[in-house]
Image (spheres, coloured by chain):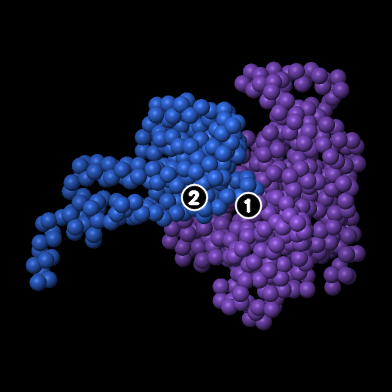
Amino acid sequence: MINQRPTSYLSFEVSGYTLEAREEEIWSRILMGVPDLLRIEAWKRLLQIDRIKGDHPKVYEAMKELARRQSPHIAQIDLDVKRTFVRHEWFRERYGSKQQALFYVLAAYSVYNPEVGYCQGMAEVAALLLLYMRTEDAFWALSALLSNKKYAMHGFFLPGFPKLMRFQTQHEAILKKYLPKVKKHMDKHDVHTNLYSVKWFFQCFLDRVPFHLCLRLWDVYLYEGERLLIAMAFNVFRMHEKAVLKLKSMDDIFGFLQRLELDFGYPDDEVVKRLGECMDELRRSKLDLPTSADNELPTKPYGALFGGLIKENQELRSELEQAKMSSGATAKDLEDLDEKGENYTEQEPDQTIKCTVAEREMAKMEKLVGRSKNGEMQVVAKVKFDGGSGKMKPLLVRCPNPGCPDPPVNSSNLIRHLGRHPSNGNHILCPITKLNCKCARPLWNKTRAEAGR
Amino acid sequence: MAASAVASPRVHDFKVVLLGEGCVGKTSLVLRYVENKFNEKHESTLQASFLTKKLTIGNRRVNLSIWDTAGQERFHALGPIYYRDSNGAILTYDITDDDSFQKVKNWVKELKKMLGTDIMLTIIGNKTDLEKQRNVSVETAEQYAESVGATHFQTSAKLNRGVEEVFLDLSRRMIEQADKQDAEKRALSPSSRSTAAGNVVLLEETPAAPIKSGCC
């Protein structure tokens, strides 16, 4: 079936503009989930990256260059790049090609849109984009996500987080109307919306639901825009209403919401189907979006520093230096900043990005293994780096199914192991990765010096 | 529950919030303390998260819920949601970074202003494993901590130095504070004791007697 999907799918955007009937079909296909191999193309089209890129030739390169000299956010970006998606193989190596790409995207964007600059949370979004796109595309995708009205993440990351407040208020209003018991329960136990919804809204549920589900949500998000955020926030509580009402303290409720990342408790298809219902319902009652607000889109021209780049370059530099001096920084700090930029000198290899579900899910699995709390998965032995052969000794992990009597297995065999283990009636897929055992590909043989520590 | 039986073994639920600049080691401290783990490559904290730890001090049982927050300046705005109702705050700086120490001072000012003396403050200089690159002197930090009524510790989450002590000391002080508040409450409203239900029995003489005679 997947083989048949591509052709009709690839044409969706073009036909989406003109044909109503076609639009219907796109929606149902998006709800079914974009086939992973097509995500690269689909996301690029939904964000209209090729068009934007064509309209702004050489801007990315210029921003990158400018950022290395002048971005006031370099230090923070440098701190965060090494802490983003670190459990993913691609982002693990310090100053490796993906870390470089991430650094450049964020640094370039921090001067391109100086109002937002850089805000924590953007790194994860950019890293997700970089799983599917080349560096420059990811830059424009990030730009589209922030400044396209449909997504308008600009308002989320702006100092003071005006859009976050607006969305949280709307979320509370929806809970009050549709799930009054939950709302009362949450209020009673002091679970403020802010305690759980920051990542929901800032990063469209990245890190808050299992990664495979998150990708499905991003499919819908890129197609539908910001109303997805409101609808999914509602959907989480609608699907888990009973479970939440049973919890008797703030700690338990908060812990429950935190654990949704490991296991959402429903199959992805069902979650997305019910999400579609939520969207319809909210749209009918006109609660699908909060009242719009001014001041949440960029007001300054993009790349404000870019205008007379060459002429003003020197001037700006000295201005910036003065500003830094007066704020207590020293010339040495500036040099340090430059050095930080220098570390990212190597241009990324021009690799064709091919990312299979198996690879990413293995990385996710690794993440679970690394976390090893909540008794979900036990780390029995740590990875040891064997310098001689340059190979990793494997991690031994237990099946996350608490009733499983089997001994710990090599993590690269875990998926296969789980496949054999009927955790869910006749369901022979791994309950966490949703992968058939045949997809399992050992990633552990690759050399990773830093993981050996 | 709060007004009853000081002498009996009692469970305290304390909320502790970790504040401080980005990348000073807040998450590492909590992870070291709660799970005894150190990971040089954990992800940056955006959504505040929390972990719990149970400990016993003397005959007191303490449940700590420890809130870990985002460090970037911009997230300062969300601070009040996390520190309101906190019994203790751990303000962390990086000993190699003077700016992060200045941030601690800002937090202290804000907490004092918003919560007065109700909240117990602990200031931590983290990353003592990088002693050679130290930029904040111990004396300066200790003097400052004393001047604002906070305790000061030096830790290394990486080498597991001093982490346990921080939480132990803070817990002790939070217990003292809770006792003090209980005592004040009792002093203010002695009548409320008799109306409190259930487990008041231990300290009350008058209601205890009839019950005794009743069951014999």
| Mark carried by residue A200 | 1
Q: Quadrant of the N terminus of chain A?
A: bottom right
On screen, B79 above or below A239?
above
Question: In this orientation, which residue lies closer to the viewer: A437 or A302?
Answer: A437
Q: Quadrant of residue A423?
A: bottom right
Q: Residues within 10 Å of mark 1 (few under 14, many from 20)?
A: some
Kind of residue indicated by mark 2: Tyr
- Residue A260 is situated, as x and y percent measured from the top left of the image, at 59, 61
Look at chain B in the picture and name its colour. blue
Q: Colour of chain A?
A: purple
Q: Residues within 10 Å of mark 2 (few under 14, many from 20)?
A: many
Q: Residue at x 63, y 35 (%)?
A: A159
Which quadrant holds residue A367? bottom right
Q: Is residue A394 above or below residue B136?
A: below
Residue B67 is at least partly visible in this image: yes
Please tell me which residue is depicted at 49% across the width and 53% down the height of the picture.
Answer: B34
Which residue is drawn at the image coordinates 53% and 60% (left, top)? A256
Residue that label 2 marks: B33
CA gap, disc 1 to disc 2?
28 Å
How many labels, in total? Answer: 2
Q: Nearer the viewer, mark 1 or mark 2?
A: 2
On residue B102, the disc is none
- Quick one: which residue is furthest to the front in this view? A388
Chain ID at mark 1 = A
Badge 1 and badge 2 in a common chain: no
Kindly identify which chain the residue marked by label 2 belongs to.
Answer: B
Q: Nearer the viewer, residue B159 or A360?
A: B159
Q: Quadrant of residue A118?
A: top right
Where is residue A5 shown, x and y percent of the image? 86, 67
Task: Indicate the position of residue B135 as horizontal and vertical percent values.
Answer: 57, 28
Q: Amino acid at mark 1?
A: Trp
